[in-house]
Amino acid sequence: MPRPTPPLAPRMADITPFHVMELLRRARELEAAGRDIIHMEVGEPDFPTPQPVLDAATRFLSRGDVHYTATVGLPALREAIAADYHDRFGVTVSPERIVITPGASGALMLALAATTGPGDGWLLADPTYPSNRHLIRCFEGVAQPIAVDAAQAYQPTVAQVDAAWAGHTRGLMVATPSNPTGTLLDATQLRALADCVRRRGGWLIVDEIYQGLSYGVEASTALAVTDDAFIVNSFSKYFGMTGWRLGWLVVPEGRTRDIERLAQHFYICPSTVAQHAALAAFTPACRDILEARRHTFAERRNLLLPALREKGFRIDAEPQGAFYIYADIANLADDCEILARRLIEEAGVAATPGIDFGNHRPRQHIRFAYTTRSERLEEAVARIGALIGR
Amino acid sequence: MPRPTPPLAPRMADITPFHVMELLRRARELEAAGRDIIHMEVGEPDFPTPQPVLDAATRFLSRGDVHYTATVGLPALREAIAADYHDRFGVTVSPERIVITPGASGALMLALAATTGPGDGWLLADPTYPSNRHLIRCFEGVAQPIAVDAAQAYQPTVAQVDAAWAGHTRGLMVATPSNPTGTLLDATQLRALADCVRRRGGWLIVDEIYQGLSYGVEASTALAVTDDAFIVNSFSKYFGMTGWRLGWLVVPEGRTRDIERLAQHFYICPSTVAQHAALAAFTPACRDILEARRHTFAERRNLLLPALREKGFRIDAEPQGAFYIYADIANLADDCEILARRLIEEAGVAATPGIDFGNHRPRQHIRFAYTTRSERLEEAVARIGALIGR
């Protein structure tokens, strides 16, 4: 018998696991029992790491010198990212403002820890990526969810931000493209939100983790409209480097040293191997691979979106980015958890119930990821159709 | 001109950078100007990653499949660590209790975030590794330093813990071997401290980051005396894998799921590449390399310790672990910062001023790391002798 241990910190009562993890456990059980499960719950591209990135890592390892780097990252990588902002988006950002981090999670933790004291509020969309509100809570802040619907493409409006801004509000967090909805903010919207936050004297955090994964619309960056935001980015999604755990944070001018002294204590430096590998992510050879993958994602999206609609899922806000479709199930079921369970148990299709993403009508939604190949997506749609009788 | 940004969180006023970083910047400047600097400030083994570890990483990369792992880490790695505890220390610990983390920093953040609410106190030695008190502060806890001296081998006693325990105290953090002092706690001391903390209903965190790097004394683990502690460990020091950013946390029985739900939000999973590489760290071939390196460290220590004493540094508590000597400079200078600056500017020797490690007589101490080869250590001692006229 384990001895009773002391109580945990109060915050732990509010930190919930991803519900999808339970589903994933069940999926593994079913697979172990011989069932074929189609994985549409996974927020991870199914492609291997691009070969130029693998080659760069292997070359680096052949030298054996895997020591700490500077806390803010390799100068060459910070410069490569700055150059990429210039080449792809026409924006000029000093490499000094770019801090390499252990994944986007690490970047978000730094931005929140630097800005959020006990009781400080952060406005953010509901639905949103679940870790956003949990990390706010970890630093004793308070998430202030803004209910967003399909009619507004699941993105907060200036009017909503103005209405929700309270005495304890410290800032606004937005995501473009958004997880779980796949919707984007355009430059006009971003500028208006940035102006609003500046007028309020608050901070702005922009999650651009899925930057580059957009379809029928140009990729963009908040750097084109503001130099005052913390911008969170990642090598995981567009660059296909999930398991390497590497991301970056663009910090407002003059704030790099503040973020650096936090980062020293949080993680010393990001993975040296991953940083050297990532240097190859900006080469033309790698870009070609990544753009081909983007086209594949676009094809999958173009297959899945009408197919789900045909089966009765409502998807009123056109998802144009990331690799997610956030579908309204009101015509099909009362509760996303029950539907998700039926999907996996009876149809062998794993998808993420809306309850992972917030409190605004979460039971009416389910998230499908198109991180598996088209034939499997077609098979999934056929199985779902058979299950719900359409 | 950068626009003025909003104020930072209150905690940022208390988060100071490592002072040694300024020194390191100065060292780089001097080196760029052609000066030869002997680096005794660096807490990083100078050896390359062991070849079996590099080979394992390269083999893994050749498959290209660098996806997320489970948040708590690869089952095979958790099992390998549990087996190593059994083989080296004769203790049985379930792999379920082992959580792989992005470095020991990641492990410490998890343990503190899970246990520390606003105003909660943590007792810890002064001097100590600086990030300990900063991470406590990050989660709104309060560091309660216990002044420790050479006479007690810089380790807190039960009497001190009992005397310092206050209403807001949540636990005790100890390190063995300790950074910056290189001193250890034996099993009797550890058991007494664990009993004391348990009697008080508190948590115990044991930093075993330098485990395995001990000289003239057997390596040990707190797992031999308690199953209730959080135990922080790392692949960085003994295993020579700093730049890979990998560590682990042994959690009290029944607490793995709590730590897992935090870890999901903090970092999703540790580096997949590093985890596959680390599987080779426990092979006999790697063990031979690591033990040979340990002997090299022992030789350096045996060279440096009497040489520094001869030059007038007082080192009353025999350092038997890690790769540090925490030297009392009272006979040589009034202020560690001034001496450290003279050492680097006039002698070309970089060492870490005591002020990085706490508030208990820090200006009377300086930390030397023997992470450079013996000839360089001899040269450093000669230069120091010339500088101080001995």
Image (cartoon, coloured by chain):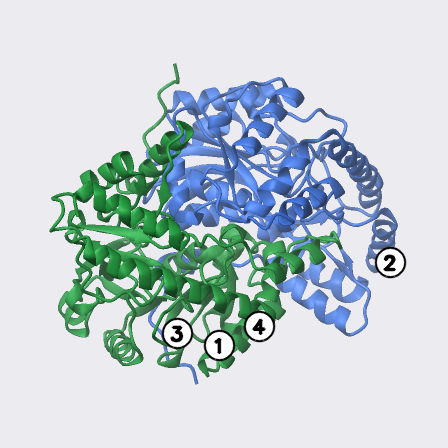
Chain colours: A green, B blue
Query: Mark 3 sits on what residue?
Result: A219
The image quadrant of residue B162 is top left
Query: Mark 4 sits on what residue?
Result: A80
Query: Mark 1 sits on what residue?
Result: A85
Q: Amino acid at mark 4?
A: Ala
The image quadrant of residue A353 is top left
Q: Secondary structure at mark 4?
A: helix
Between marks 4 and 3, how big is the CA–CA gap? 18 Å
Of the numbered discs 1 and 3, the one sitting upstream in the chain is: 1
Q: Give the foreground label among 2 and 1.
A: 1
Q: Position of residue A71 (x, y in %)?
A: 57, 60
Which image quadrant: the N terminus of chain A?
Answer: top left
Specify whether disc 4 shares its chain with disc 2.
no
Q: Secondary structure at mark 2?
A: helix
Which residue is at the front of the view, B386 or B77? Answer: B77
Between marks 4 and 1, how big is the CA–CA gap? 9 Å
Q: Give the side of residue B380 with respect to residue A189, left or right.
A: right
Q: Give the foreground label among 4 and 2.
A: 4
At x 54%, y 37%, the residue is: B248
Instruction: Please state the chain letter of the residue tagged with numbered disc 1 in the rendered image.
Output: A
